[in-house]
């Protein structure tokens, strides 16, 4: 009945509407499955990192290990690394991937947006993000997570780029935030 009403008022035939619903449901089942896969993978990475970071108390050793493990274990990570505030400048730090911009223009782009907002920023399509700084034209989506010191002050960001569009979700945000805390355990 509802399908009949919808097709009557929208002008779409009921068979086309059923096909449309089929694809919507199929797509949402597929993305739920993908998100579940992500959860499992992050959970395994987290366990591995927990034991690795405890082998040293060095901040830089832990940052480097986090970047290496994430970059090599997650296939959609194209560039993975830290930008840290040094003398007020957002300066590239430990990273894996193609050569990156060394200093990011103040208050421009995704890294500065996450730093200034004090929250994780997920960008589905970097080409539509105002002021996005393109260090490599192959990047299509991005996530930037604020990085805090032991006292809870934001001292930089973890930045991940993907060549895939809309590669990052709330699952990436939650796990990356949790993983960054391993620098200080
Ligand atoms: N895209 C970032 C710049 C850093 S690179 O992605 C490695 C930005 O807009 O801040």
Image: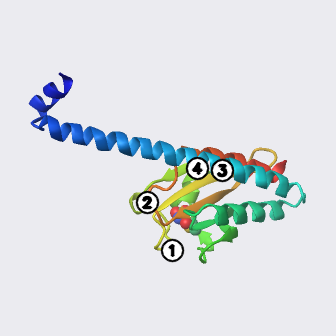
Q: Secondary structure at mark 2?
A: loop
Q: Residues within 10 Å of mark 2 (few under 14, many from 20)?
A: some
Residue 106's label in the rendered image is none
Q: Residue, x 47% and y 72% (percent of image)? A: 138
Number of the front mark, 4 or 2: 4
Q: CA distance from mark 4 to mark 2?
A: 16 Å
Q: Nearer the viewer, mark 1 or mark 3?
A: 3
Where does the image place residue 57, in percent across and percent down from the top left? Answer: 90, 57
Q: Position of residue 19 (x, y in %)?
A: 23, 42
Instruction: Tell me whether circle 3 and circle 4 mark residues in contact (CB < 8 Å).
Output: yes
Q: Earlier in the sequence, mark 4 or mark 2?
A: 4
Instruction: Report the residue marked by disc 3.
Output: 42
Measure the alpha-carbon separation of dots 3 and 4: 6 Å
- Which mark is on residue 165? 2
Dots 4, 2 in contact, CB < 8 A = no
From the viewer's perspective, tell me whether residue 164 is left or right of residue 4. right
Q: Is residue 66 left or right of residue 80?
A: right
Quadrant containing ligand 1: bottom right
Residue at image coords 51%, 74% = 136
Check disc 4 and report the residue beneath it.
38
Q: In what element is the residue under mark 3?
A: helix
């Amino acid at each position: 009945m509802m399908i009949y009403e919808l097709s009557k008022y929208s002008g779409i035939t009921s068979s086309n509407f059923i096909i449309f619903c089929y694809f919507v449901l199929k797509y949402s089942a597929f993305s739920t499955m993908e998100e579940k896969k992500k959860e499992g993978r992050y959970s395994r990475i987290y366990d591995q990192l927990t034991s690795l970071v405890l082998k040293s108390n060095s901040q830089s050793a832990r940052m480097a290990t986090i970047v290496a493990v994430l970059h090599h274990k997650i296939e959609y990570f194209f560039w993975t690394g830290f930008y840290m505030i040094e003398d007020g400048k957002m300066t590239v730090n430990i990273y894996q991937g193609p050569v990156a911009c060394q200093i990011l223009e103040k208050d421009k782009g995704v890294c500065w947006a996450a730093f200034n907002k004090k929250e994780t920023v997920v960008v589905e399509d970097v080409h539509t993000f105002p002021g996005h700084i393109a260090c490599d034209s192959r990047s299509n989506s991005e996530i930037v997570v604020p990085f805090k010191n032991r006292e809870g002050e934001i001292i930089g960001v973890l930045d991940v780029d993907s060549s895939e569009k809309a590669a990052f979700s709330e699952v990436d945000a939650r796990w990356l935030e949790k993983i960054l805390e391993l620098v200080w355990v």
